[in-house]
Image (cartoon, grey):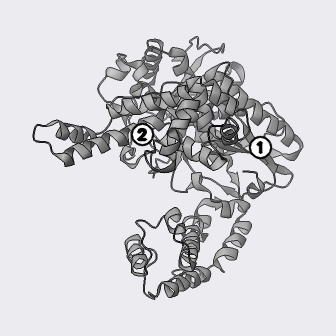
Amino acid sequence: MLVLLHDDVARPGWVLLQRRADDGVVLGEEAVPAERLAEAVAETERELRPRWVWDDTARRYPGLLAAGVRVERAHDLRLCHAILRGSARCAGSALREAPEGPWDAPRVVGPEEDEAEPEPTLFDDVAPPEPAQPVLPDPAGELERQLAAVAGSDAPGRLRLLLAAESSGALIAEEMTHDGLPWSAEEHDRILTEFLGPRPTPGRRPQKLEDCGRRVRELLGQPDLDLDSQPELLKGLRRAGIEVATTRKWELLEHGGPEVEHLLEYKRLARLWSANGWAWLDTWVSGGRFRTRYLPGGVVTGRWSSVGSGALQIPAAIRGAVVADPGWRLVVADAAQLEPRVLAAMSGDRAMAEAGRHADLYAGVVAAGVVADRKQAKVAMLGALYGSTTGASAALMPRLEKAFPRAIGMVEAAARAGERGEVVSTWLGRSSPPPGQWWHDAVEAASREDAGPDEARAARSARRDWGRFTRNFIVQGTAAEWALCWMAALRRRLREIDGRPHLVFFLHDEVIVHTPEAVADEVAQAVRDAAVEAGRLLFGATPVEFALSVSVVGSYADAKG
């Protein structure tokens, strides 16, 4: 069926694309053989420029991309269902109140139905469920339920923007997978050889890693110590007189000494070997491109995750392998201190917005006389965003509360809501999940007549932990919404620039565009203009400036920041 609806964006309409049981396709009102799908979609795209409605972009778009067809807009029913199903703004809607059904099943990854390995969510106890094969019936009916939920919500305009941004992000994710990130296998091999030594034979470890490990064991006086076992390493450090509670870098650095120096080097090399060594190179890079599968909305806050490859954790050591093609450049941009700027805009805190007029917001906090130096500013702001209750950040919190009362008041209110077990929402309407049974059990145990000090402590800890989650949820989630709008606005602009510059990488607040050298400066300006548009789309005429660091480089390693 053809669904023609006014969608507040002054476009012709929406076209529903759905599979038939006989492997054909229903495109609008027309039944199309599967082998003619790409041609039919391309023709409809040229004539109508519609918003395509389909069950799952990750399943439907890769085949079109492989056939050389790209669409401008889409509505991803699966992603949008997840947002509306969980949004407190849709309370009372038929979609939100209905029992769980096929549209609530976890996503599958792409047309091959590969199993996903999602990265951790904001807190480990809010992990996404295991992948499963969904059966998604009646997409037309699902679309009507979603539209009704939005229309009946208490903020339909914001939800429409969120659904459009989420769906656009799904298109971008598949396009980036299809195009791939330019990657030099030769340069990657050279970097690995420099740090680790020549590529070892199968079953062996790199020579420089082995030499470094041997040196650590000698310095600790424990030649048989297993450096790769965290419990054994911790015991070994204590036997050597290095009293630490964990093997984290910051704690080890407090002790110093040659043992710690060499141990940190060993950990760095071991991480490079295991996460991005030759096995990773062989698996993920081919034809001069690194391709992964992104999972839009893979984290409860709306942030993306990725499947298996560690795409969202490309370490600085191997960024030199990300090299533009001959005659092309990389435009690398990241949003400076995005979350504090988002908090300033959400809360309408003009004092924080004024601090953000500096390219470095932390320097602006210092200039406002709130703290003495940039380090204090960063510690204090991160404490406000993540709910640190001890140490330097807690000591600096009263200064932030006095200087930025509206901003700090907003995250404090979100924290108190979480401590009460309530749900909070981002600026556009993605809501946090309710606390799990463990939280309710802890709180209930403390309320019993025979409850003792242990139960009271457990309940306080549970409330505090969930308050930390909801405190950051509203900011991190809204920052993810800003980033989606930024990418969507940028994608639209790139389509209008000659030479087909295209997005090839995204990481929370950072993007990379691969562009012909002749239009690199135009692309860089498009990146900046898109950031301004994203701020305006979310917050209207806000005084907050979303500062960017933009570099036009041949290699990712040469980018600023």
Tell which residue pokes out farthest to the left in this image. Answer: 450
Q: Residue at x 48, y 24 (%)?
A: 429
Where residue 332 sits: x, y (%)? 74, 46
Q: Residue at x 87, y 52 (%)?
A: 327
Q: Residue at x 67, y 40 (%)?
A: 366
Q: Is residue 444 left or right of residue 34?
A: left
Question: Regarding mark 2 in the picture, which secondary structure is present there?
Answer: helix
- The residue where tag 2 is placed is 469
* Residue 431 percent location from the top left of the image: 43, 29
Q: How many marks?
A: 2
Q: Quadrant of residue 68?
A: top right
Residue that numbered label 1 is attached to:
550
Horizontal placement of 479 versus 492: left or right?
A: left
Of the numbered discs 2 and 1, the one sitting upstream in the chain is 2
Alpha carbons under labels 2 and 1: distance apart: 31 Å
- Identity, as a three-letter code, of the amino acid under mark 2: Phe
* Mark linked to residue 292: none
